[in-house]
Image: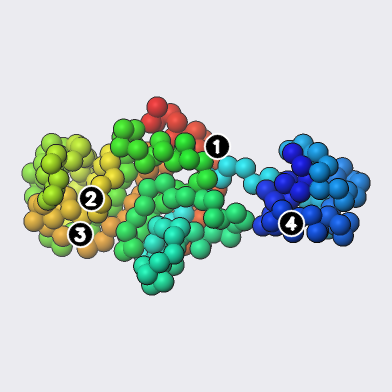
Amino acid sequence: MRLDKFLCESTELTRSESKRLLKTGSVSVEGVIVKNPACKVTDDAEILLDGAPLTLVGSRYIMLNKPVDTICSTHSGTRAELYPSVIDLLNVIKSDRLRIAGRLDVDTTGLVLITDDGQWSHKITSPVKKCGKRYRVELAMPPDQSAIEQFAQGIQLQGEKKRTRPAQLEFISHQEVLLTIHEGKYHQVKRMFAALGNRVTALHREQIGSITLDPDLEAGEWRYLTEDEINSVQEVTS
């Protein structure tokens, strides 16, 4: 890889900015000052910028605890002007490369997975993969026990030709349940309960596949996924 490209891939610098920076003698490769932007370097070379080591960004896999009144979008627009994007909560370089694997509504909280690995993201979001997503749901009214079987058989949503895929419903308290779905239709959880004559008053996603929201993450906080968590997406959805 050319040195100027390495600088672009490890910082927010553009190619022209990297070339100008190299002329100042601020960059060293294996202890030697290098000013030639065409100098070839390896990915694991010791490259310092003003004495600080640089590394390539590579693929990133992030878990974030989404707070209320944030949007799962990377695009600007009217809605973005009203609410900040969850991407804005990340203090990382090259954030424009990141994409959200499985979005949540503005008023829904909980687990959001963010990555720049498109194939990995596809394993979570593709309906074919049937990746489970578990939600903690607070309801306006206590649901009937018969709802367990109704969700297991699939719910007929308004405007849809087919029932939803079988979902697993577990009662926690009088008006609180856990619901695991295996698809991601528009406002699906809210529409499923609405089809049964109930209303969702609070919605929080706890798990995607076998990745569970870290209890140490406060709303708005994030961390990188562990290797086991990253690899679990391949294992669960293959």
Amino acid type at image mark 3 = Val
Marks 4 and 3: which is nearer the front?
4
| Disc number for residue 200 | 3
Q: Distance between the residues labelled 1 and 3?
A: 35 Å
Q: How far apart are marks 3 and 2 (CA)?
A: 11 Å
Name the spot of residue 65 as percent of width and height, x first: 43, 56
* Residue receiving disc 4: 16
Amino acid type at image mark 1 = Glu
Is disc 4 in contact with disc 1, using a CB cutoff of under 8 Å? no
Mark 4 or mark 1: name the one nearer the start of the chain. 4
Element under disc 3 = strand
| Left or right of residue 52: residue 96 | left
Mark 1 or mark 3: name the one nearer the start of the chain. 3
Q: How far apart are marks 1 and 2 (CA)?
A: 30 Å
Element under disc 2 = helix
* Residue receiving disc 2: 188
Element under disc 1 = helix
Check the image and report above or below for 52 versus 145: below
